[in-house]
Image (cartoon, helix red, strand yellow):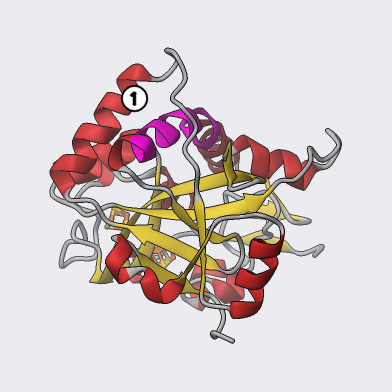
Amino acid sequence: MSQTIHFACTMCGKCCHDLRLPLSIDEAIVWLRDGGEVEFFCEAIPWPEEPPEDNLLARHKRQRSFATASGELPVRIVVNLVASFEGACPFLQTDMRCGAYTKRPRVCRIYPAEVNPFIELDPGSKACPPEAWSQDNRVLARHGVIVDAEIAELAAQSRRVDAQDVDTKARACAALGISTAALANEGFAIHSPDRDSMLRALSAARESTGSESVDPMQWSFVSNRSSTRQVLDEIGAKVTPSEDSATSGFRYFAFHAAD
Ligand code: SF4
Ligand code: SF4
């Protein structure tokens, strides 16, 4: 895209509804302490061998995941801490202002820009009204690159923190017994420990980060597709059908219909 994108927030509040907000560890702890709900959205990337260093997409995935195994298959696990809500955000005020403005998550400060450098900003996919994109507003992005210095720095900061949080997330999953993930790009295995357990696990994991590493757990894949389960089984991975999710303490969010 070679478009120049102008933007100014109209304070319509539309982006504060029906969300899945990705949070850093510190943000999740604040969100939980303020009475919000946080869940673990887990996905697993088969990683049979290390891609070359100059593979930028693989580098991005490696930075935000930790290495472990599923059966005989080396995998990398991406754990997203997510605050989900239907309707208005619990912190949205009736005048459409943010009731947690000074401590709102980084992703709220970056919106509508993208954190993922491989996803280009598409105004058509955003909740903002047409006047927010008026050419009278300041320039947000040019030729697919965020040029607003403050937003660009926040997005870069978000990626740095995401990478720094990986070890802490691995420790928190081990403490909470979370070891099931969806195949990346097929869905998420969503784990919802109660607030107190999650707060304890995240706080303890953060304090122990950097000390002796935790024993890597064996992870299982979950899928609603029999073809996926068959392929994973053939390459030696541990596999769970999505129908078993209720009895295994998580729920499965599918991107595709079952086959
Ligand atoms: S924290 Fe504030 S800015 Fe973020 S979704 Fe909630 S109300 Fe909106
Ligand atoms: S949807 Fe866009 S214009 Fe409306 S409050 Fe959110 S960022 Fe601002």
Residue in the picture at 55% in, 45% down = 77
Residue 65 location (% of width, % of height): 57, 40
Residue 151 location (% of width, % of height): 54, 43
Query: Is 171 situated above or below 221?
Result: above
Residue in the picture at 60% in, 41% down = 152
Tally of numbered discs: 1
Q: Nearer the viewer, residue 152 or 211?
A: 211
For this view, does 59 lie left or right of residue 82?
right
Q: Looking at the image, in which quadrant does ligand 1 appear?
A: bottom left
Residue range in magenta is: 162-174
Note whether residue 51 is visible.
Answer: yes
- Which residue is farthest top? 211
Residue in the picture at 65% in, 63% down = 232
Q: Which residue is mark 1?
A: 206
Residue 231 colored magenta? no
Question: Splitting the image into 4 quarters, where does residue 174 fall?
Answer: top left
Question: Splitting the image into 4 quarters, where does residue 2 fall?
Answer: bottom right
Residue 171 colored magenta? yes
Determine the main secondary structure of the stretch shown in magenta.
helix
Query: Is 49 situated above or below 211?
Result: below
Query: Is 217 situated above or below 9?
Result: above
